[in-house]
């Protein structure tokens, strides 16, 4: 096994690397967007429940 790649290489490595880069970047972007969206929902729910608690405490006075 003298060579790791064939001698008459037609340049397949660069397109494969670019496609792999785009796939990994797309998956990473999907998970980051999903995480940020989930955190925004948690913050919205937190502010809703805080304001509901404040209203409930004010009505008990």
Image (cartoon, helix red, strand yellow):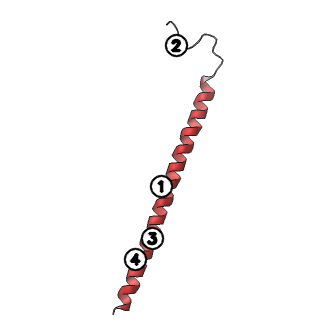
* First reached walking from the N terminus: tag 2 or tag 1: 2
Query: Dot 3, how many residues are within 10 Å of its Cα: few (below 14), some (14-19), or many (20+)?
Result: few
Q: Position of residue 23 (x, y in %)?
A: 57, 39
* First reached walking from the N terminus: tag 4 or tag 1: 1
Residue drawn 54% across and 44% down?
Answer: 27
Q: Position of residue 55 (x, y in %)?
A: 41, 85
**Residue 13 picture quarter:** top right
Query: Dot 4, how many residues are within 10 Å of its Cα: few (below 14), some (14-19), or many (20+)?
Result: few
* First reached walking from the N terminus: tag 3 or tag 1: 1
The answer to whether mark 4 and mark 1 are in CB contact below 8 A is no
- Residue identified by numbered label 1: 35
Residue 38 left/right relative to 21: left
Residue drawn 55% across and 41% down?
Answer: 25
Residue drawn 47% across and 60% down?
Answer: 38
- Residue identified by numbered label 4: 50
The answer to whether mark 3 and mark 1 are in CB contact below 8 A is no
- Residue identified by numbered label 2: 4
The answer to whether mark 3 and mark 2 are in CB contact below 8 A is no
Residue 42 drawn above or below residue 54:
above
- Dot label at residue 45: 3
Query: Dot 1, how many residues are within 10 Å of its Cα: few (below 14), some (14-19), or many (20+)?
Result: few
Q: Position of residue 28 (x, y in %)?
A: 51, 45
Residue 19 left/right relative to 49: right
Q: Quadrant of the C terminus?
A: bottom left
**Number of disc labels:** 4
């Amino acid at each position: 096994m003298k060579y790791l790649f064939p001698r008459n290489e037609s340049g397949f490595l660069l397109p494969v690397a670019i496609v792999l880069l785009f796939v990994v970047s797309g998956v990473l972007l999907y998970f980051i967007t999903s995480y940020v969206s989930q955190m925004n929902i948690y913050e919205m729910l937190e502010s809703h429940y805080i304001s509901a608690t404040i209203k409930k405490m004010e009505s008990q006075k």
